[in-house]
Amino acid sequence: MADTEYTPLPVTPVSHKDAETERYHTFVNLALVLAAITGVELVLVYMPFHPIFIFTSLLTLSLFKFVAVVAWFMHLIYDKMVLTLAFGTGLVIATGTFVALGFLLSREWVDVDAITQF
Amino acid sequence: MSATENEEDSHGSLVINNKKLLMWLFLGSDCMFFGTLISTHLIYRKLYPESYDPLLVFDLELTSFSTFILLMSSFLMALAVSAMHKGELKSFRRNTIGVIFFGLIFLACQVYEFAHFTNEGLTLSTNTFGSTFYMMTGTHGVHVAIGVFWLLCLYFYSYSGKMDAHESAVDVEVAGLYWHFVDIVWIIIFTAVYLIEYIPGLH
């Protein structure tokens, strides 16, 4: 496709561009941190630590990555609170469903042998 | 709400863009959808830990590579959105094609993984692990494929000469939100489905 089709976009205000340039550095730093955390996660599962410690660490790192992407890459910290509420509602219901199902269908409450026979 | 007001929304004006609000609501509902799929997988894994040993087929190096690729695609997507807000069309195209390329690599890794698992005897109907695993990761894969298609459409549309920094920046941002969401879902799946299987003595 030829570049002759290129149409210059309307000029954006300088302050707006400065803000975007500032965000660029934030994005680069965040990408490096996310890559490093993924590396740490990979190494962590092979370390001779207590399983609970590894599990908790993985959960914490995973949540950090989740929040970081939502906050900075998805611009949620720069946007209106109502957008956080819109997403947060779904997230809370999803987490609540997981916790509720986890309790309802735990081994103490479910007769696994009966289900297997059935 | 005018197009100009829409564009200024993410940068501090008083209005809320309808497209963005709708996308965030959709992502909230998609959270519930994936939450159910992940919950189902983990609960069945807890109820029937002896039904299958996923370590027989899992390849953590490959999955970590996929995760890294998807994280970097998210980074490029953020740069593409930023470029569009600055009105830099060439930069937008460069970053978007990077995101598409990384998305395709991720999909190729997933196809390879599924083919490998099937060859090892793990199919959708083998056991509960196979059913919930393929359902969850397959649904995520479909989301990635839709995202790639969406970005391809935006990429080719950028050559039409109809893109402007006001309305199109919002469209790119909405596509970016979807792509980042696909990334965060994978962040959870990577830990909850793959990594915890490698913790000795947890099950």
Image (tube, rainbow, N blue to C red):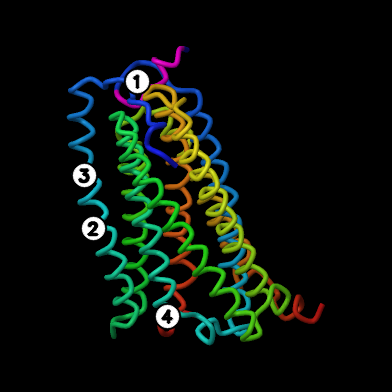
What residue do we see at 60% from left, 77% from top? B115
Circle 4 is placed at which residue position? B198
Residue B124 appears left or right of B157: right
Residue B94 appears left or right of B133: left
Q: Assess whether mark 4 and mark 2 are in contact (beta carbons under 8 angstroms).
A: no
Helix, strand, or loop for circle 4? helix
Q: Assess whether mark 4 and mark 3 are in contact (beta carbons under 8 angstroms).
A: no
A86 or A104: which is nearer to us?
A86
Circle 2 is placed at which residue position? A33
**Picture coordinates of residue B59, whole percent (x, y):** 46, 80
| Dominant SS type (magenta) | helix
Q: Which residues are magenta?
A: B2-11
Q: Is residue B121 a member of the stretch shown in magenta?
A: no
Camera-nearest label, 1 or 4: 1
Helix, strand, or loop for circle 2? helix
Type of the residue with mark 2: Val
- Say the numbered circle drawn on residue A26: 3
Q: Is residue B4 a member of the stretch shown in magenta?
A: yes
Image vertical order of residue B101 relative to residue B16, above or below: below
What residue do we see at 57% from left, 47% from top? B32
B83 or A4: which is nearer to us?
A4
**Could you tell me which chain the residue with mark 4 belongs to?**
B
What residue do we see at 27% from left, 64% from top? A37
Q: Marks 2 and 3, Cα distance to the nearest angstrom? A: 11 Å
